[in-house]
Amino acid sequence: MNLTVLRKLAKSNRFQALYRRVKESGFLKLFKNDYDLSKIQDIFLYYLEIYYMLYQDLAEKKPYLTEEVIDNELRTDAYLFMKFKHKSKNDKKREVTTASNVPSVIFKRKN
């Protein structure tokens, strides 16, 4: 199966609504089999989550994200690349700023 078809299905309102219900309730099923998913099912679930995240970002009016970006696969991939690259840079900055190279000082009272 072509990845473009899977992306179109995952982006559709029908499957996004179904996926949202599955995430919220936890007991609805997307597939007949719960375990041992096929490669196509894994890819489809991946794109469902990606487009779910994109539509949430769109609702939150994140910068650089519009309907045109979501409609174009290349622009979608570029946005995701930028988003995750920016996120990883922020994570690295946090790691550096939380680490302290200042030696600890222990104060003791003289008796």
Image: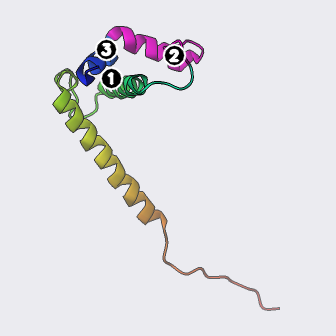
Which picture quadrant has residue 17?
A: top left
Q: Position of residue 79 (x, y in %)?
A: 23, 36
The residue positioned farthest toward the top in the image shown: 14
Coloring basis for residues: rainbow
**Residue contact between numbered discs 3 and 1, judged by CB atoms under 8 Å:** no
Which circle, 3 or 1, is nearer the viewer? 3
Which of the two discs, 1 and 2, labels the residue nearer the N terminus? 2
- Residue named by callout 2: 22
The magenta region covers 13-33
Q: Secondary structure at mark 3?
A: helix
Q: Give the foreground label among 1 and 2.
A: 2
List x then y, in percent, for residue 89. Answer: 33, 54
Q: From mark 2 to mark 3, how far is it between C-alphas? A: 16 Å
Q: Position of residue 44 (x, y in %)?
A: 38, 22
Asked if residue 91 is among those painted magenta in the image, a careful observer would answer no
Which residue is label 3 attached to? Answer: 9
State left or right for residue 33 relative to residue 57.
right
| Cα–Cα gap, marks 3 and 1 | 14 Å
The residue at 31%/14% (across/down) is: 9
Q: CA distance from mark 1 to mark 2?
A: 16 Å
Question: Of the residues shown, which amino acid type is indicated by label 2?
Answer: Val
Q: Which quarter of the picture shows residue 1?
A: top left
For residue 78, above or below residue 32? below
